[in-house]
Image: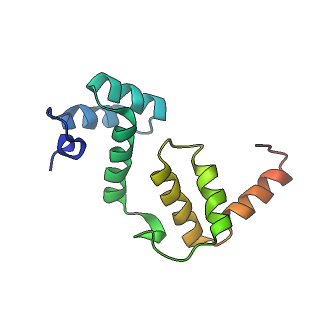
């Protein structure tokens, strides 16, 4: 399946996207949004599809299918923190669940470590 089919777009932008990522191995969100604008694609839909595709290539870490038992407070804290890095709530939740699958109190520990270092929200 070609990339444009994931986006339900008429034109094939797969080559443009591959070329972009070959030149920009670790792009910022605004660079991805600019590419979406250049290609005439909704930037939020584009970002979500990009991360889904990357997840399919690299796997989803320890959480695999993102099912499991997570402490509600810890997960909520994790989603809020991960939203700092993505505009997609789906991606934020998946990242949080992946961290929590490895360490059950990951975000509590992170918050404590930041407080000890004098880092404020």
Check the image and report above or below for 20 versus 96: above
Instruction: Name the quarter where the C terminus is drawn.
Output: top right
Q: Report the number of numbered marks.
A: 0
Q: Position of residue 104 (x, y in %)?
A: 64, 73
Q: Nearer the viewer, residue 28 or 89?
A: 89
The residue most toward the bottom is 69
Residue placed most toward the observer, 25 or 54 = 54
Residue 102's x, y, as percent?
Answer: 57, 71
Tell me: 43 left or right of 91: left
The quadrant holding residue 42 is: top left
Instruction: Give left or right: position of 61 versus 119.
Output: left
Q: Is residue 94 visible?
A: yes
> Residue at horizontal 37%, vertical 33%?
43
Where is residue 96 shown, x and y percent of the image?
56, 60
Protein image colouring: rainbow
At 55% from the left edge and 43% from the top edge, which residue is drawn?
85
Q: Is residue 24 visible?
A: no
Residue drawn at the location 21% of the way across and 43% of the way down? 3
Q: Residue at x 80, y 59 (%)?
A: 112
Residue 91 x %, y %: 46, 52
56 vs 49: above or below: below
Is 23 on the left-hand or right-hand side of 93? left
């Amino acid at each position: 399946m070609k990339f444009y089919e994931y986006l339900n777009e008429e034109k094939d932008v797969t080559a443009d996207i591959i070329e972009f990522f070959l030149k920009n191995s670790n792009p910022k969100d605004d660079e991805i949004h600019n590419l979406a604008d250049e290609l005439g694609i909704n930037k939020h839909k584009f970002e979500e599809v990009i991360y889904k595709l990357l997840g399919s290539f690299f796997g989803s870490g320890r959480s695999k299918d993102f099912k499991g038992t997570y402490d509600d407070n810890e997960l909520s804290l994790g989603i809020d923190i991960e939203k700092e890095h993505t505009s997609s709530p789906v991606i934020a939740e998946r990242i949080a669940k992946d961290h929590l699958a490895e360490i059950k109190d990951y975000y509590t520990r992170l918050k404590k470590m930041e407080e000890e270092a004098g880092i404020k929200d």
